[in-house]
Every structure is written in C-alpha cells, then in structure tokens.
Image (cartoon, helix red, strand yellow):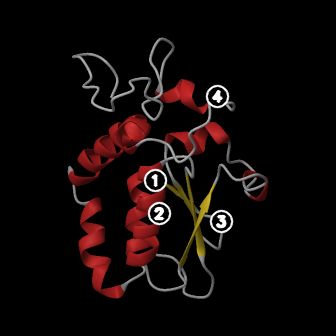
C-alpha cells in the first residue's frame, strides 16, 4: 500500500482519451492527495523517472510510489484504489488465484486497443511513432474520417 505521507504518481497516456478518463477516475477513487496523474507524453516527464521508457509506458500505465516502487497495468490501479480503507478489501481481491490473470489479460487487450476504443486526444498526424504501435501500416487513424456525411459504417475487418 502507498504511504500516506507523499503522493504516488500514476503515469498514463495523455494522448489517449480512454487513458485520460481512466486516470481521472483513478485519482477520484484513491484517497485524496494519495495519487497524482501525470501524462508520460508531456515533455520532460519521463526524465523524472530514470529507467522508465516511452515504450514501457505505452504498454501499461505505471504507478510510482514515493519510495520508488513500480506497479504496472491493472495492479497499478489496484494499489491506487487500495489507498482508501473502504476499498482495500475489494481491491485486493485482484490477488486471489485466477483473478489476477484474468484482469491482466483484459488490461493488456484494452491497452493494445485503447486508441480504437475512444480515440486520441490529439487529432494531428502522429509524429512520435505512437500510432504505429496501435495502427499497423495500412490502417488509418480512426479519429480522422474522410467521409463527408459523417455516416460511415466500417466494413468487417476495417479498423474502427
């Protein structure tokens, strides 16, 4: 559990609408002042956390405790929520046999498809290579539609 003396930092993808909403909800669920949400996409942020790379943060959100301990993905959310005494027991159900594996797989799928779920917060063309992780070559950015009537329905197999 995160000590009460200092705030932990949750690093999330600030270019992702799903992640941005999730980070806000996570801060709201945590004990007030226990968690600070910071987009790792902001300039200079990752320099504050030696050993964390852009690629690692693209795979999963990271919770950095005041003593430097790292939690990734679903476990980061569990540790953040567990800062509230009344949510500790339900949060730690994550550690029951089988639950962790299911939650981690679900988290990994959502993380890999997050831009397709709600889109990006930035609408300009991808310049940092982030899109290549989530939109392989030959697929297009779902936030940029080239239909003019706004009624485009994706065909089967077409990215959302």
How many numbered callouts? 4
Numbered disc 3: secondary structure: loop
Query: Residue 46, percent across and down?
Result: 72, 52
Separation of marks 4 and 3 at Cα, in angstroms: 28 Å
Numbered disc 4: secondary structure: loop
Snapshot quadrant of residue 69: bottom right
Name which of mark 4 and mark 3 comes first in the sequence.
3
Separation of marks 3 and 1 at Cα, in angstroms: 22 Å
Give the number of the disc on residue 23. Answer: 2
Q: Is residue 44 above or below residue 157?
A: below
Asked whether 83 or 122 is in front, the reply is 122
Name which of mark 1 and mark 4 comes first in the sequence.
1
Give the number of the disc on residue 129. Answer: 4
Residue drawn at 55 percent across, 41 percent down: 58
Give the number of the disc on residue 68. Answer: 3
Q: Is residue 153 left or right of residue 84?
A: left
Query: Residue 59, percent across and down?
Result: 51, 40
In contact (CB < 8 Å): disc 4 and disc 2:
no
Query: Residue 63, percent across and down?
Result: 54, 61
Give the residue furthest to the front. 149
Which residue position is annotated with label 1? 19
Separation of marks 1 and 4 at Cα, in angstroms: 18 Å
Numbered disc 2: secondary structure: helix
In contact (CB < 8 Å): disc 1 and disc 2:
yes
Name which of mark 3 and mark 2 comes first in the sequence.
2
């Amino acid at each position: 559990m995160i000590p009460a003396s200092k705030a932990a930092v949750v690093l999330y993808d600030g270019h992702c609408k799903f992640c941005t909403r999730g980070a806000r909800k996570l801060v709201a669920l945590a004990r007030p002042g226990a968690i600070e949400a910071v987009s790792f996409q902001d300039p200079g942020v990752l320099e504050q956390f030696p050993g964390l790379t852009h690629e690692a943060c693209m795979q999963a959100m990271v919770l950095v405790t005041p003593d430097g301990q790292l939690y990734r993905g679903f476990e980061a959310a569990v540790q953040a929520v567990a800062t509230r005494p009344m949510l500790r027991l339900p949060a730690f159900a994550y550690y029951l046999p089988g639950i962790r594996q299911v939650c981690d797989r679900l988290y990994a799928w959502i993380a890999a498809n997050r831009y397709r779920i709600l889109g990006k917060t930035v609408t300009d063309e991808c310049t940092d290579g982030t899109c290549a992780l989530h939109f392989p070559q030959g697929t297009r950015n779902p936030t940029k539609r080239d239909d003019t009537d706004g009624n485009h329905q994706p065909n089967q197999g077409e990215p959302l």
